[in-house]
Amino acid sequence: MEELLQQIEQYKQEIAATTAANAEELETFRIKYLGTKGIVKAVMGEMKNVPGDQRKEFGQVLNAFKIFAEEKFATLKDSIAAGAQATGSSIDWSLPGSTIPVGTRHPLSIVRNQIVSIFKRIGFAVAEGPEIEDDWHNFTALNLPENHPARDMQDTFYVNQSPDYLLRTHTSSVQARVMEKQKPPIRIICPGRVYRNETISARAHCFFHQVEGLYVDDNVSFADLKQALYFFVQEMFGKDVKVRFRPSYFPFTEPSAEMDISCSVCAGEGCSLCKHTGWVEILGCGMVHPKLLENFGIDSNKYTGYAFGMGVERICQLKYKVNDLRLYSQNDVRFLRQFTSAL
C-alpha cells in the first residue's frame, strides 16, 4: 500500500500545479481526474485490494484525495468565471451550450415524400429530370400541337437566349425522357418543381410542385388506373374518403378524366375550399394517347398505359388546411414550426 500512497501524493502535486485558462482546459482537467474513467475513480477502485484492518485508515486517505481534486476543480472554475467578468464578458464558458431547436422538413417535402412512399409500395420507381427543358420533351413529344394554349408566352417562361428552351411547365417531360430511353414495362412517378407565368395570389403561384405517374405495359386498362388512385387517396386521406371521376380532356391522354375527392375540410358538407360542392379536384389522369407512345418508338398495338398528375400544394392544402399558396414559399418560421410533429 506504500507504493499507492506515494502515487496519490504525486497526483496531488500534479493537481495542485494545474492551471486552466479557459473552459476547454477546465474540461480536460475534469475528464482526467474526475471523469468516469479518471484517476480519482481508478484510485478509489484500489480499495478492494486493501487489507481489512487498514481499510478505515486508507478510506480516509482516498476520500481526502477525492475532495482535494473536487476543490481544485471548483477553484479553477471560479477563476475562469472571475476572469470573464474582469474582461467585461457576461458569458460563463463553463456552462453547457444552448439547446438547438428541433428542425423540420418543409410541409411540401413532407407531403411529397408521403406521396412517393405510397406509390413505391405498389411498384412505382422515382424518376427525375431537368427543370430547364426543351420544346420537344415538354410539348411536342407529349402531343401538344404548336397552337396549344399551354405554349402561349402568358403561361410559359421561355429562355431568352434560345426560344427552344423553357422552364418546364409540368413533370410530364420526365416521362418523355424515360420513354425515350426505356422500353416497357415502365412504372414511374416523377416528383419535381414546375413553372408557369401566373400572377401570384392565394390560389396561384409562378412555381409549384407536381407528382406525375406513368405505367406502360401489356394490357394496362383504365380499371388499373382507378385501382391505383383509389389506393393512393385512401392511404393519404383515410378509408372514408369518397371518390368520383369526371370526363375531361388532355392532349396526352385519351380517354381523360379529372379525379375529385370529398372535401376533407368540411367532410363534404360544403365550404369555400370546395366552393360549396362538397368535392375537390386533386388530379388529372387518363390512358396514354397512342400517338404519344409512337413518338418514342413504343408499339401502341402491343402496349397501353395510363398517366396521372397532381399538385403537391393541393394535396398539402387538403391535408393541413392551408389555403394560401404564398405561405409555402415565404419561409416564415412561425408557419414552418407547426409541421415539426408531422415528421
Image: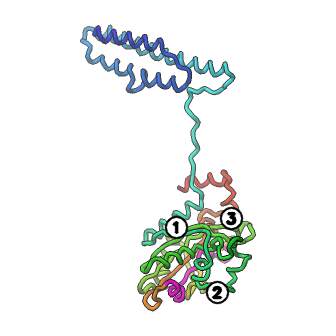
Decide which of 239, 232 is in the foreground and name it: 232
Label 2 sits on residue = 145
Q: From what the image shows, is residue 99 above or below residue 37? A: below
User: From the viewer's perspective, is 11 left or right of 222?
Assistant: left
Front residue of 214/51: it is 214
Amino acid beneath label 3 = Leu
> Closest to the observer: 178 or 307?
178
Tag 1 residue: 115
Q: Amino acid at mark 1?
A: Ile
Q: What residue would you read off at disc 3? A: 325
Q: Tell me the crowding category of disc 3: few under 14, some 14 to 19, or many 20 or more residues within 10 angstroms, Cα based.
A: some
Element marked by disc 2? loop
Circle 3 SS class: helix
Residue at image location 39% in from the left, 23% down from the top: 38
Residue at horizontal 50 percent and vertical 77 percent from the top: 214
* Lower position in the chain sequence, tag 2 or tag 1: 1
What's the residue at 57%, 18% (across, down)?
A: 78
Q: Position of residue 191 (x, y in %)?
A: 55, 68
Q: Are marks 2 and 1 in contact (CB under 8 Å)?
A: no
Asked which secondary structure carries label 1, the reply is: helix
Q: Which residues are magenta?
A: 274-296
Point out the frontmost of discs 2 and 1: 2
Give the quadrant of the N terminus: top left
Position above or below: 337 against 320: above
